[in-house]
Image (cartoon, rainbow, N blue to C red):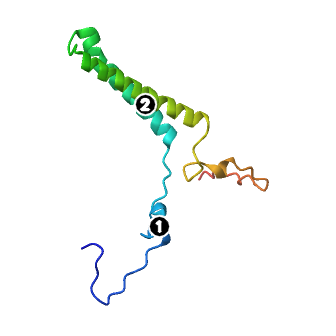
């Protein structure tokens, strides 16, 4: 079994981040909720448009339940698109390794690098 060990064998202690006693700290989530929601919303809207093309222009799948499902997926895509736009516009994303915070900090002690001179032989 995964958690069992032979009798008397010492089990290595996991770091705090991987410790089973702290499941919320097991994996830090640095998800991009705003961008993910934006792209998911656009994808679902496009898919709903493709599936709506058949009953609207070709006369195929002209069933009321099919058209209702197309509207449902359209509104789901619209919801994700709106959430993604709001998330990005309101700057709800917390800083993490994906944000370039060091580049935004003003360095007063910054020195320009020495110019490189190419010597031709």
Residue nearest the viewer, comparing 24 with 37: 24
Q: Give the residue drawn at x 47%, y 73%.
A: 15
Q: Does 56 sit above or below residue 96?
A: above
Identify the residue at the far right of this view. Answer: 108
Q: Does 30 sit above or below residue 16?
A: above
Please say if the residues under marks 1 and 2 sit with CB atoms less than 8 Å apart. no
Residue 22 — which label?
1
Crowdedness near tag 2: few (<14), some (14–19) or many (≥20) residues, C-alpha within 10 Å: many
Measured from the top left, where is residue 103 in percent x and y? 66, 49
Q: Give the residue drawn at x 28%, y 21%.
A: 51
Between the residue at mark 1 and the residue at mark 2, the CA separation in whole angstroms equals 34 Å
Closer to viewer: mark 1 or mark 2 = 1
Looking at the rendered structure, the secondary structure element under dot 1 is: loop
Residue nearest the viewer, comparing 3 with 12: 3
Q: Is residue 117 left or right of residue 84?
A: right
Q: Give the residue drawn at x 48%, y 67%.
A: 17
Q: Give the residue drawn at x 45%, y 32%.
A: 80
Q: Is residue 28 left or right of residue 114?
A: left
Residue 14 visible in the picture: yes
Identify the residue at the far bottom of this view. Answer: 8
Residue 60 — which label?
none
């Amino acid at each position: 079994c995964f958690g069992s060990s032979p009798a008397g064998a010492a089990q290595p202690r996991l770091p705090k981040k991987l410790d089973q006693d702290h499941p919320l700290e097991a994996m830090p989530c640095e998800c991009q909720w705003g961008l993910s929601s934006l792209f998911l919303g656009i994808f679902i809207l496009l898919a709903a448009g493709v599936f709506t093309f058949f009953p609207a222009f070709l006369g195929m799948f002209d069933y009321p339940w099919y058209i209702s499902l197309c509207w449902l997926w359209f509104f789901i895509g619209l919801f994700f698109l709106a959430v993604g736009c709001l998330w990005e516009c309101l700057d709800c994303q917390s800083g993490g390794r994906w944000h370039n915070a060091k580049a935004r900090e003003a360095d007063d002690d910054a020195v320009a690098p020495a110019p490189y001179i190419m010597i031709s032989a």
